[in-house]
Amino acid sequence: MTSTTPGKYADFESLRQQAIALRREGLSRRQIRDRLFVDNNDLLNRLLNGEPAPEWTKRPNAKDDLRDRARELRSQGMTYDQIQVELGCSKSSISLWVRDLPKPDRTRTPEEASAIARREWEARLQRREDERQQTKQDGANEVGNLSDRELFLAGVVLYWAEGAKDKPWDRRESLKFINSDPNVIRLYLKWLELLGVSRERMHFRVSIHESGDVACAEEFWADLAGVDASVFQRATLKKHNPRTTRKNTAEAYRGCLMIYVTKGADLYRRMEGAWYGIVLGADPAT
Protein backbone atom coordinates (compact mmCIF):
# COMPACT_ATOMS: atom_id res chain seq x y z
CA MET A 1 0.00 0.00 0.00
CA THR A 2 1.49 3.33 -1.03
CA SER A 3 1.34 6.25 1.39
CA THR A 4 0.13 9.65 0.42
CA THR A 5 2.50 12.56 0.58
CA PRO A 6 1.88 14.68 3.75
CA GLY A 7 -0.53 17.53 3.30
CA LYS A 8 -1.82 16.50 -0.13
CA TYR A 9 -5.55 15.65 0.07
CA ALA A 10 -6.62 16.73 -3.41
CA ASP A 11 -7.46 13.25 -4.66
CA PHE A 12 -10.06 12.52 -1.93
CA GLU A 13 -11.51 9.36 -3.50
CA SER A 14 -8.08 7.78 -3.93
CA LEU A 15 -7.25 8.61 -0.35
CA ARG A 16 -10.57 7.21 0.83
CA GLN A 17 -9.96 3.92 -0.95
CA GLN A 18 -6.60 3.63 0.81
CA ALA A 19 -8.17 4.44 4.19
CA ILE A 20 -10.97 1.88 3.71
CA ALA A 21 -8.50 -0.77 2.66
CA LEU A 22 -6.39 -0.17 5.74
CA ARG A 23 -9.49 -0.22 7.93
CA ARG A 24 -10.54 -3.57 6.51
CA GLU A 25 -7.06 -4.89 7.22
CA GLY A 26 -7.83 -4.20 10.91
CA LEU A 27 -5.92 -0.96 11.51
CA SER A 28 -7.06 1.55 14.10
CA ARG A 29 -7.84 5.20 13.39
CA ARG A 30 -4.48 6.24 14.82
CA GLN A 31 -2.64 3.71 12.68
CA ILE A 32 -4.47 4.86 9.55
CA ARG A 33 -3.82 8.49 10.39
CA ASP A 34 -0.10 7.84 10.81
CA ARG A 35 0.11 5.63 7.73
CA LEU A 36 -1.63 8.19 5.47
CA PHE A 37 -0.27 11.30 7.22
CA VAL A 38 -3.80 12.60 7.83
CA ASP A 39 -3.62 14.97 10.78
CA ASN A 40 -7.11 16.42 10.34
CA ASN A 41 -9.76 14.51 12.34
CA ASP A 42 -12.64 15.84 10.27
CA LEU A 43 -11.01 14.59 7.11
CA LEU A 44 -10.27 11.23 8.72
CA ASN A 45 -13.92 10.92 9.74
CA ARG A 46 -14.99 11.55 6.14
CA LEU A 47 -12.49 9.03 4.80
CA LEU A 48 -13.73 6.29 7.15
CA ASN A 49 -17.42 7.19 7.04
CA GLY A 50 -19.53 4.03 7.06
CA GLU A 51 -16.65 1.68 7.83
CA PRO A 52 -17.08 -0.15 11.16
CA ALA A 53 -14.20 -0.29 13.58
CA PRO A 54 -12.40 -3.63 13.94
CA GLU A 55 -13.46 -5.65 16.97
CA TRP A 56 -10.09 -5.38 18.70
CA THR A 57 -10.40 -1.58 18.95
CA LYS A 58 -13.76 -1.66 20.73
CA ARG A 59 -13.52 -1.03 24.44
CA PRO A 60 -15.32 -3.60 26.60
CA ASN A 61 -18.40 -2.21 28.30
CA ALA A 62 -18.67 -3.15 31.97
CA LYS A 63 -22.46 -3.16 31.63
CA ASP A 64 -22.62 -5.55 28.67
CA ASP A 65 -23.18 -8.57 30.94
CA LEU A 66 -25.87 -6.71 32.91
CA ARG A 67 -27.56 -5.65 29.69
CA ASP A 68 -27.61 -9.22 28.35
CA ARG A 69 -28.94 -10.53 31.65
CA ALA A 70 -31.63 -7.83 31.76
CA ARG A 71 -32.79 -8.74 28.27
CA GLU A 72 -32.88 -12.39 29.23
CA LEU A 73 -35.00 -11.66 32.33
CA ARG A 74 -37.32 -9.41 30.33
CA SER A 75 -37.82 -12.18 27.79
CA GLN A 76 -38.83 -14.42 30.69
CA GLY A 77 -41.63 -11.96 31.53
CA MET A 78 -40.09 -9.98 34.36
CA THR A 79 -41.10 -6.36 35.03
CA TYR A 80 -38.66 -3.47 35.39
CA ASP A 81 -39.05 -3.62 39.18
CA GLN A 82 -38.27 -7.32 39.28
CA ILE A 83 -35.22 -6.92 37.05
CA GLN A 84 -34.02 -4.05 39.24
CA VAL A 85 -34.26 -6.22 42.37
CA GLU A 86 -32.49 -9.07 40.61
CA LEU A 87 -29.62 -7.03 39.12
CA GLY A 88 -29.40 -3.99 41.39
CA CYS A 89 -29.23 -1.51 38.48
CA SER A 90 -31.45 1.51 37.78
CA LYS A 91 -34.78 1.22 36.01
CA SER A 92 -33.71 3.92 33.55
CA SER A 93 -30.85 1.69 32.37
CA ILE A 94 -33.14 -1.33 32.19
CA SER A 95 -35.61 0.66 30.08
CA LEU A 96 -32.89 1.54 27.57
CA TRP A 97 -31.68 -2.04 27.36
CA VAL A 98 -35.03 -3.80 26.88
CA ARG A 99 -37.40 -1.24 25.38
CA ASP A 100 -37.47 -3.08 22.03
CA LEU A 101 -38.69 -6.28 23.70
CA PRO A 102 -42.42 -7.01 24.14
CA LYS A 103 -44.01 -6.21 27.47
CA PRO A 104 -44.81 -9.21 29.67
CA ASP A 105 -48.41 -10.36 29.94
CA ARG A 106 -50.24 -9.20 33.06
CA THR A 107 -51.62 -12.55 34.19
CA ARG A 108 -51.09 -12.21 37.96
CA THR A 109 -53.89 -11.76 40.45
CA PRO A 110 -53.83 -8.64 42.64
CA GLU A 111 -52.76 -10.83 45.56
CA GLU A 112 -49.85 -12.28 43.60
CA ALA A 113 -48.76 -8.84 42.44
CA SER A 114 -48.93 -7.56 46.01
CA ALA A 115 -46.84 -10.48 47.27
CA ILE A 116 -44.24 -9.91 44.57
CA ALA A 117 -44.10 -6.19 45.35
CA ARG A 118 -43.69 -6.97 49.05
CA ARG A 119 -40.84 -9.39 48.39
CA GLU A 120 -39.17 -6.86 46.13
CA TRP A 121 -39.45 -4.16 48.78
CA GLU A 122 -38.13 -6.48 51.47
CA ALA A 123 -35.20 -7.42 49.24
CA ARG A 124 -34.46 -3.75 48.63
CA LEU A 125 -34.60 -2.98 52.35
CA GLN A 126 -32.29 -5.90 53.10
CA ARG A 127 -29.84 -4.71 50.47
CA ARG A 128 -29.85 -1.24 52.01
CA GLU A 129 -29.35 -2.71 55.46
CA ASP A 130 -26.45 -4.85 54.24
CA GLU A 131 -24.84 -1.78 52.70
CA ARG A 132 -25.42 0.19 55.92
CA GLN A 133 -23.84 -2.50 58.07
CA GLN A 134 -20.92 -2.93 55.67
CA THR A 135 -20.19 0.80 55.84
CA LYS A 136 -20.19 0.65 59.63
CA GLN A 137 -17.91 -2.39 59.60
CA ASP A 138 -15.53 -0.64 57.21
CA GLY A 139 -15.43 2.32 59.59
CA ALA A 140 -14.63 0.05 62.53
CA ASN A 141 -11.89 -1.71 60.55
CA GLU A 142 -10.27 1.62 59.75
CA VAL A 143 -9.70 2.30 63.46
CA GLY A 144 -8.13 -0.92 64.68
CA ASN A 145 -6.39 -1.02 68.07
CA LEU A 146 -5.83 2.32 69.84
CA SER A 147 -2.45 3.38 71.18
CA ASP A 148 -2.29 4.84 74.71
CA ARG A 149 -2.01 8.32 73.22
CA GLU A 150 -5.04 7.79 70.98
CA LEU A 151 -7.05 6.43 73.91
CA PHE A 152 -6.01 9.39 76.05
CA LEU A 153 -7.12 11.91 73.41
CA ALA A 154 -10.37 10.03 72.75
CA GLY A 155 -11.14 10.04 76.47
CA VAL A 156 -10.43 13.76 76.77
CA VAL A 157 -12.85 14.54 73.93
CA LEU A 158 -15.44 12.17 75.38
CA TYR A 159 -15.25 13.73 78.82
CA TRP A 160 -15.41 17.29 77.50
CA ALA A 161 -18.53 16.38 75.53
CA GLU A 162 -20.33 14.41 78.25
CA GLY A 163 -18.70 15.05 81.65
CA ALA A 164 -19.31 17.72 84.30
CA LYS A 165 -17.13 20.79 83.75
CA ASP A 166 -15.72 23.53 85.95
CA LYS A 167 -17.27 26.99 85.67
CA PRO A 168 -15.79 30.32 86.87
CA TRP A 169 -18.89 30.84 89.00
CA ASP A 170 -19.01 27.24 90.19
CA ARG A 171 -15.64 25.60 90.89
CA ARG A 172 -15.97 21.87 90.15
CA GLU A 173 -12.50 20.57 89.41
CA SER A 174 -13.38 16.91 89.68
CA LEU A 175 -14.20 14.08 87.28
CA LYS A 176 -17.91 13.38 87.27
CA PHE A 177 -19.36 11.51 84.31
CA ILE A 178 -22.85 10.19 83.56
CA ASN A 179 -24.18 8.36 80.53
CA SER A 180 -26.71 5.73 79.50
CA ASP A 181 -24.70 4.16 76.66
CA PRO A 182 -22.80 1.03 77.83
CA ASN A 183 -20.13 1.48 75.14
CA VAL A 184 -19.53 5.08 76.23
CA ILE A 185 -19.14 3.89 79.82
CA ARG A 186 -16.72 1.14 78.73
CA LEU A 187 -14.54 3.65 76.90
CA TYR A 188 -14.61 6.05 79.85
CA LEU A 189 -13.55 3.28 82.26
CA LYS A 190 -10.67 2.29 79.97
CA TRP A 191 -9.60 5.94 79.92
CA LEU A 192 -9.65 6.11 83.72
CA GLU A 193 -7.58 2.93 83.87
CA LEU A 194 -5.06 4.55 81.50
CA LEU A 195 -4.86 7.49 83.92
CA GLY A 196 -4.14 5.11 86.79
CA VAL A 197 -7.50 5.48 88.54
CA SER A 198 -8.38 2.34 90.50
CA ARG A 199 -11.93 1.13 91.05
CA GLU A 200 -11.55 2.02 94.75
CA ARG A 201 -11.40 5.71 93.80
CA MET A 202 -14.60 5.49 91.78
CA HIS A 203 -18.03 6.06 93.27
CA PHE A 204 -20.94 4.61 91.31
CA ARG A 205 -24.58 5.65 91.29
CA VAL A 206 -27.51 4.73 89.06
CA SER A 207 -29.85 7.46 87.87
CA ILE A 208 -33.10 5.93 86.70
CA HIS A 209 -36.77 6.71 86.23
CA GLU A 210 -38.86 5.94 89.29
CA SER A 211 -40.72 3.20 87.41
CA GLY A 212 -37.48 1.42 86.45
CA ASP A 213 -36.00 -1.69 88.07
CA VAL A 214 -33.25 -0.24 90.29
CA ALA A 215 -31.79 -3.56 91.43
CA CYS A 216 -31.63 -4.93 87.89
CA ALA A 217 -30.02 -1.72 86.63
CA GLU A 218 -27.38 -1.78 89.40
CA GLU A 219 -26.52 -5.40 88.61
CA PHE A 220 -26.16 -4.54 84.93
CA TRP A 221 -23.85 -1.56 85.49
CA ALA A 222 -21.88 -3.34 88.24
CA ASP A 223 -21.17 -6.23 85.89
CA LEU A 224 -20.08 -3.84 83.16
CA ALA A 225 -17.79 -1.90 85.53
CA GLY A 226 -16.35 -5.04 87.11
CA VAL A 227 -17.44 -4.18 90.67
CA ASP A 228 -19.94 -5.54 93.18
CA ALA A 229 -23.36 -3.91 93.16
CA SER A 230 -23.09 -3.46 96.93
CA VAL A 231 -20.61 -0.58 96.42
CA PHE A 232 -23.21 1.49 94.57
CA GLN A 233 -24.49 4.60 96.28
CA ARG A 234 -28.22 5.09 96.66
CA ALA A 235 -29.87 5.45 93.25
CA THR A 236 -31.23 8.76 92.04
CA LEU A 237 -34.87 8.38 90.98
CA LYS A 238 -36.30 10.59 88.27
CA LYS A 239 -39.89 11.75 88.78
CA HIS A 240 -42.34 11.23 85.94
CA ASN A 241 -43.65 14.29 84.16
CA PRO A 242 -47.26 13.52 83.18
CA ARG A 243 -47.02 15.98 80.26
CA THR A 244 -44.32 13.92 78.53
CA THR A 245 -44.42 10.52 76.86
CA ARG A 246 -41.47 8.32 77.80
CA LYS A 247 -39.77 6.26 75.09
CA ASN A 248 -37.35 4.35 77.35
CA THR A 249 -39.82 1.89 78.83
CA ALA A 250 -38.50 -1.40 77.43
CA GLU A 251 -37.04 -4.16 79.57
CA ALA A 252 -33.56 -3.16 78.40
CA TYR A 253 -33.92 0.23 80.12
CA ARG A 254 -31.09 0.51 82.64
CA GLY A 255 -31.07 4.24 83.33
CA CYS A 256 -27.73 6.07 83.49
CA LEU A 257 -24.53 5.30 85.37
CA MET A 258 -22.79 8.15 87.19
CA ILE A 259 -19.08 7.73 87.97
CA TYR A 260 -17.38 10.12 90.38
CA VAL A 261 -13.60 9.99 90.91
CA THR A 262 -12.31 10.97 94.34
CA LYS A 263 -9.21 13.17 94.61
CA GLY A 264 -9.57 13.95 90.93
CA ALA A 265 -8.76 17.68 90.83
CA ASP A 266 -5.34 17.20 89.22
CA LEU A 267 -6.78 14.75 86.70
CA TYR A 268 -9.53 17.22 85.85
CA ARG A 269 -7.00 20.00 85.26
CA ARG A 270 -4.93 17.69 83.09
CA MET A 271 -8.02 16.74 81.11
CA GLU A 272 -9.05 20.36 80.59
CA GLY A 273 -5.55 21.36 79.56
CA ALA A 274 -5.39 18.47 77.11
CA TRP A 275 -8.73 19.50 75.63
CA TYR A 276 -7.48 22.99 74.85
CA GLY A 277 -4.31 21.41 73.51
CA ILE A 278 -6.44 19.40 71.08
CA VAL A 279 -8.28 22.55 70.01
CA LEU A 280 -5.00 24.40 69.48
CA GLY A 281 -3.46 21.43 67.67
CA ALA A 282 -6.41 21.27 65.27
CA ASP A 283 -6.39 25.03 64.65
CA PRO A 284 -3.15 26.80 65.70
CA ALA A 285 -4.78 30.14 64.90
CA THR A 286 -7.29 29.66 67.70
Image: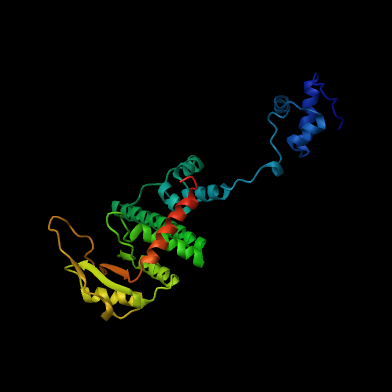
Name above or below for residue 99 compared with residue 158.
above
As drawn, the residue found furthest toward the right would be: 2
The N terminus: image quadrant: top right
Is any part of residue 173 visible from this angle? yes
Measured from the top left, where is residue 158 in percent x and y?
Answer: 39, 60
- Residue at 22 percent of width and 60 percent of height: 247
Residue 271 placement, left or right of 240: right
- Residue at 81 percent of width and 22 percent of height: 7
- Residue at 73 percent of width and 35 percent of height: 29
Residue 24 placement, left or right of 151: right
Measured from the top left, where is residue 97 in percent x and y?
Answer: 51, 42
Name above or below for residue 44 compared with residue 171.
above
Name above or below for residue 41 compared with residue 178.
above
Name above or below for residue 47 compared with residue 152.
above
Q: Quadrant of residue 17?
A: top right
Measured from the top left, where is residue 62 in percent x and y?
Answer: 58, 48
Closer to the camera in the image, 68 or 100? 68
Closer to the camera in the image, 195 or 77? 195
As drawn, the residue found furthest toward the top would be: 10
Is any part of residue 145 visible from this angle? no
Q: Total of numbered circles in the picture?
A: 0
Measured from the top left, where is residue 264 in percent x and y?
Answer: 36, 68
As drawn, the residue found furthest toward the left would be: 242
